[in-house]
Amino acid sequence: MTPSRARTRSASKKAEPAPPVAPRPFTPHHLVPPHEVLTEEESQRVLKNLDTSIERLPRILLSDPGLKTDPKFLAAREAGETFTGRLVRIRRPSQTAGEAIAYRALAASPGE
């Protein structure tokens, strides 16, 4: 049995590389609570009020999509500011407390 012409033609064609996929634009979602990156002074004040150190707080990566809800963060990142030693305030609605506030320490990579 000999292969048909259609097979030999399609097999001889070189596969073209797929065009690069553009990143999807960020669209805020109603279930993502607002994130607010604090200044260094505000971060120190919060740490003092909580009577804890930054090492004891949970981390949040700079690449976390929730940070895109803060326009000040986007502007600071475009300006090239450093975020070491800064905190993020996350405000979540709560049925019992009205509003629950959580703090996270900014980290550039998962190991930080």
Image: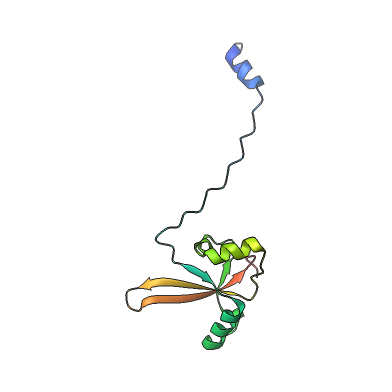
Location of the C terminus (image quadrant): bottom right
Whole-percent x, y for residue 17 in the image: 64, 33
Location of the N terminus (image quadrant): top right
Q: Is residue 11 left or right of residue 101?
A: right
Residue drawn at x 64%, y 28% is 15
Q: Quadrant of residue 95?
A: bottom left
Q: Quadrant of residue 5?
A: top right
Q: Is residue 46 left or right of residue 97?
A: right
Whole-percent x, y for residue 22 in the image: 58, 44
Tell me, yes or no, if residue 51 can be seen here.
Answer: no
Residue drawn at x 63%, y 76% is 85
- Front residue of 23/17: it is 23
Residue drawn at x 56%, y 85% is 45
- Front residue of 99/11: it is 99
Q: Quadrant of residue 32?
A: bottom left
Outermost residue toward the left in this view: 95
Q: Is residue 49 left or right of residue 81?
A: left
Tell me, yes or no, if residue 27 can be seen here.
Answer: yes
Whole-percent x, y for residue 65 in the image: 53, 60
Residue drawn at x 45%, y 57% is 28
Number of marks in picture = 0
How does the figure colour the protein chain or chains? rainbow
Vertical position of residue 71 compared to residue 104: above or below:
above
- Front residue of 79/92: it is 79
Vertical position of residue 36 compared to residue 10: above or below:
below
